[in-house]
Image (cartoon, rainbow, N blue to C red):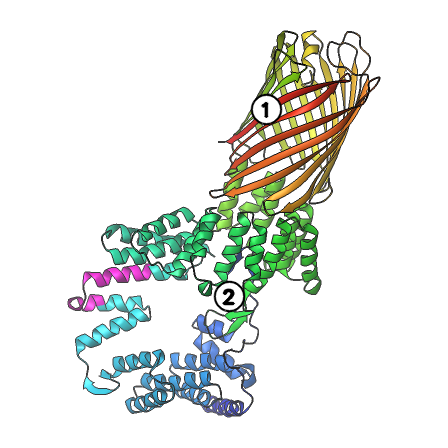
Amino acid sequence: MVKTSAWVLVNLLTLSALAQAEELVEAGNTVVPVNQPEQVSAEHVVEPIVIPATTVAGMYAQENYIGISDQAARSAIKAFTPQEWQYIAKAARNIGQYEQAQTYYQALSTTKTRASQQDGRLGLWLTAIDQRAQDSALTQGHAYLKQFGNDASAQDAQQYYRQVFKRDFNNASVVSDNERIKADYRAAAKQKRFAKQRELLQQYPQLFGGNDALWLDLAEQQEIIATTQTTTADNTQNLNTANERLLALLAAHPDNVELQKSGLASQLDAAVRLNRPQDGIAAYQQLQTLEPNIAVETKAMYADALLSNKQPKAALAVLASIPTEQLTDEMHDNIISAYSDMGYMSKAQASRQNWSIAPKRNDFTHNYRIPNAYATEREFWDIRLNDWDGHHRKANRMVKARLDVAPADTNALRLKGDLRRWQGFPDDALAAYDEAAYYIHPDERVGLQVNRATVFLDQGDYRSAHASIDLLPDYSASKQDLLKRLDLQAAPQLNVQSSWSDTTSPPQQQHEWSINSQLFSARSQDGHRAYVEHEVETSPYGKDTLRMQRVGVGAELNFYPTQVDIAAGHGTELNQKPYLHASVNHQFNQWFKAGLEVQKNSETTPLRALEKDVYADAAIANANFHLSADVDAGLGVSVNDLDDGNLRREAYAYVSSTLWQRDRFSLKNYSRIDWQKNRPTASAAYYNPEQAHSFSTEFTAQYRHFLDHDVQFTQQLTAGIGRYYQKNQAAEDTWLLRYGHNWDIHDAYGIGYSVGRKRSIYDGNPEYSNFIGLNASIKF
């Protein structure tokens, strides 16, 4: 006891000295405690702030009051801020060390900072009540009221006085038992002491009705929902249980309008936290029928649910209805996300620039100021939007500049990985994620595992994707999203491609058309799948039409980075022989991949050759290069050995690039050189130039519409020109004009169609034709 009193006296003297020094807290601000951690944010998501258990605030949050007292006894007075001495004083109150608590509060009440003075005065008042010292409580209470007025804290303290002394603070008359019990109930409700409320309901049923019990049940579930994050399996289970009880409560009382209004908002909150956006949307729409004036916070949760449900346009409309001065950082973040999801990068940038953000924000206790993670997120949005709008090099420079200053910034390293993944460089992306993992505790690498699994799915590396997803906890919403994507990529699939053309000059009596269909099975765990294929092709032949048809089965074998494709079948019309195709493709690195293929009874054999019972075998090689985010190139060679003695050799090279991009618009170019050489074969009934080569270039203007419910509609207009050179013939110009649409619905259904006209050259003679293309893909 002597040791403790001496320690208290030393600290009291030091606090008094601090009160005479320069103020520790500036007006309108608070001092960040020693060792306060930086907040870390995941992509598009700000994670909850965690106060380490080693800090005074952290120990207080864990109710480790004795630990606070012991730490204060071991530490120098300058190790703590006035805010931390408030926690120390509260801890002393909580464990009954009222003398020490009064000492700390008295010292705080004499500091120069008004906020600390107020906390000190209030603490003296409450500590007197704790000790049942009524005279002292009256004295301290009147002193507080005189200095700070009858504010909310004073009213709470008076209510506490009334509970303890059974008297009104300003009236010596005895409070009736019924009034006291109801006051106790209201105080417990305000403090969210649900067990105390339930105890009073059971002890005094004559004072309360069924409505009180109903609202207590609702309040309990609402509190669990509002304070629970799905960061652990237990939390997720608790949240699910609270949500189920809430739904049962609302279902049992459909006519209680006020209960429905309050409960539906919490149902929306739970749905957002549990990643069930459709349930949340339904709850909000029901709430709209009951309440015309919905709270801003509820509207913001609704917008969050709409974004999760891939309805950015609807989410933006909701956020636009909120007055600008009421927009929080989270709402600003969602506005930018909605614009970017709709393809409006310039509007997203304008919103980002209009986002006035404070570099620091309150922690969960509202006593400390900590770094605002949204300040970093605002900067990261600038980098993302530049990349998505085609400024890839600028985005890379921006993230590099940040890492040059802070090489261990794990958020910046993750962003670097994201940029390289979006730009088509998975090796760089994985390297950046691995570097970030070096600085993160293994228990906190969930976000990085999500990033890695996404890269593996992009590449078609199903074994690695499964391994990464299996490491994620079951309660993770990201795991559920990845499993949905995995199921979609592995689903059975039907692909159909068809084309039709009509040669108008010189006119032909028949048309050309073809249709190729493939039906794939579901993929195995490793990504293997089987398929059946059917091909039909027709071509004019004088006044008649040649029709070829064949059917077969095949398998795609996934040994990433090596892919093997084997197919075998038989011709059923015109082509009367079996066929066998086998190909191997290997991804050497993020820059280069190559493939080899052999075809027995080649699929490129001209129909006029087949009509003469001439078949061909082929060998094909190709190489493809990913040079940058905007440029790809490739080349290939093939040899076709026909039964009539002809040996057809072909080669090509191409470059594909995005020349310009702005919001939903882009301009692309595809340029290609082709070369062909054939053996002179007198019996050849098909087009067989001895030697020919050509150059062509196409420019495509593209506009993408991003619609709600994960629907993308793309318009494309292509114009191309070229030059065709054939041995012993004059060189001639070629051209093409095409317009088409593509629909992508939920990444599960795709359809494209186009119409066009082109000029081709055969043996020095121009040929003009109209054409139509159609393709469809359905995943089951």
The structure residue drawn at horizontal position 64% and vertical position 62%, both measured from the top left corner, is: 409
**Helix, strand, or loop for circle 1?**
strand
Query: Does the CB distance between marks 1 and 2 fall below 8 Å?
Result: no
Percent x, y of residue 497: 58, 25
Q: Is residue 601 in sight in this rendering?
A: yes
Percent x, y of residue 582: 68, 24
Residues drawn in magenta: 201-221
Q: Nearer the viewer, mark 1 or mark 2?
A: 1
Q: Nearer the viewer, residue 554 or 292?
A: 292
Q: Which residue is mark 2?
A: 50
Q: Which residue is mark 1?
A: 772
Q: Quadrant of residue 560?
A: top right
Magenta: main secondary structure = helix
Q: Quadrant of residue 23?
A: bottom right
Query: Does residue 458 appear left or right of residue 16 in this picture?
Result: right
Percent x, y of residue 339: 53, 51
Alpha-carbon neighbours of circle 1 within 10 Å: few (<14), some, or many (≥20)? some
Work out which quarter of the rendered image holds the N terminus and state it.
bottom left
Q: Is residue 662 above or below residue 365?
A: above
Q: Is residue 461 in sight in this rendering?
A: no
Alpha-carbon neighbours of circle 2 within 10 Å: few (<14), some, or many (≥20)? some
Q: Is residue 548 above or below residue 472?
A: above
Q: Nearer the viewer, residue 469 or 485?
A: 485
